[in-house]
Amino acid sequence: MSRVYNFSAGPACLPLKVLERAASEMTNYNDNGMSVMEMSHRSPVYEAIIAEAEQTLRKIMNIPENYKVLFLQGGATLQFAGIPMNLLNGSGKADYVISGQFSNNAYEEAKKYGDIKILASSKDENFSYIPQFKASDIRQDADYVHICQNNTIYGTVFKEIPDTGNIPLVSDVSSYILSEPIDVSKFGLLYAGAQKNIGPSGVTVVIVRDDLIGKARPSTPKVMDYKVQAENDSMINTPACYSIYIAMLVFKWIMEDIGGLETMQKINVNKAQILYDFIDNSKLYKSTVKKEFRSIMNVPFITGSEDLDNKFVKEAAKNGIVTIKGHRAVGGMRASIYNAMPVEGIKALVEFMKKFENENV
């Protein structure tokens, strides 16, 4: 069977070149006689891998020196608790923007650790837009403000980085990281599960400013303490070795093959525009997101008929277009078009959509 176009929201498709290199090194990495899966994380060979992963990520994201880069485990979900454990250490207050399911999950988890306030929410319209707020709306003694930059399920994105004044801004960038340049200096902390734009599941990237670490509450487990992890190069226990190795290959692909995040952004904007243009001019399909908040990573759309949506998903799979069923919160379809999705995949999807429309309208 030939490779399909995988529009999964995560775990998502990976660059073919990365997969082919990993396959060639599966049993013998760099002439060391073993797989990365087998080697000790304390070996010089693996220490070089994780060091290169960090160095390459720092280069492509232009991460300032006063930020630590951590490769942790537990997914972004574990950071819903890890962030308040590490940062909710002043007033014990934090303000959360609720723009989708994951930011709401983060809010619910944080409530266990302090005084957590909803700063703004778009729940009133099923998260079809990004809620707005002003710096003056933030509690001035808050320890941090939390947002989810790109909402995987609902297909919305913050087009502008919110102004939080002197309050550290924390952002879940799981389905946004590496899709375009990010000004890291405007954030106190960024975190991302790997399984969308970085690599396979199992590793979570945390980028945190130096002055925000070292103040974790005493009850924080060592494995979740940013200072302890930073002092031990993310290896107080065995890290997600193979996932970090694949992440390193993806970082190198972005730097060497794509040419950096500015070029990556141009590619992603073009891919999204092809799909949105077709949807906007279609007689059958409709976007579920207000135009000014549309994501270039996740594109949900519907036909208006549940039966037609189900038929679309089944027939698409027969045409090599898979994992495109929408999340139950939105329904319809969702095309997750992360970095590794080639433009050919978008064009194949649009051609199928045209055919399906002609046959069903």
Image: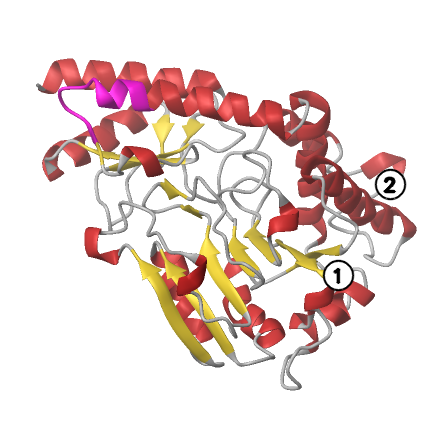
User: Colour scheme used in the picture?
Assistant: secondary structure
Expressed as whole percent of the image width and height from the top left, the position of residue 101 reads 34, 57
Expressed as whole percent of the image width and height from the top left, the position of residue 11 reads 49, 44
| Whether residue 89 can be seen here | yes
Q: Quadrant of the N terminus?
A: top left
* In the image, residue 61 above or below residue 227: above
Expressed as whole percent of the image width and height from the top left, the position of residue 135 reads 45, 59
Q: Amino acid at mark 2?
A: Gly
User: Which of the pair 58/53 is nearer the observer?
Assistant: 58
Residue 123 is inside the magenta segment: no
Q: Residue lying farthest right?
A: 44
Which residue is disc 2 drawn over?
A: 33
Which residue is disc 1 drawn over?
A: 234
Q: Is residue 79 left or right of residue 292?
A: right
Residue 282 is inside the magenta segment: yes
Q: Is residue 131 left or right of residue 116?
A: left
Q: Quadrant of the C terminus?
A: top left
Q: Residue lying farthest front?
A: 136
* In the image, residue 68 above or below residue 251: below
Which span of residues is magenta-colored?
276-286
* In the image, residue 1 above or below residue 299: above
Residue at 75%, 61% (x, y): give it. Answer: 234
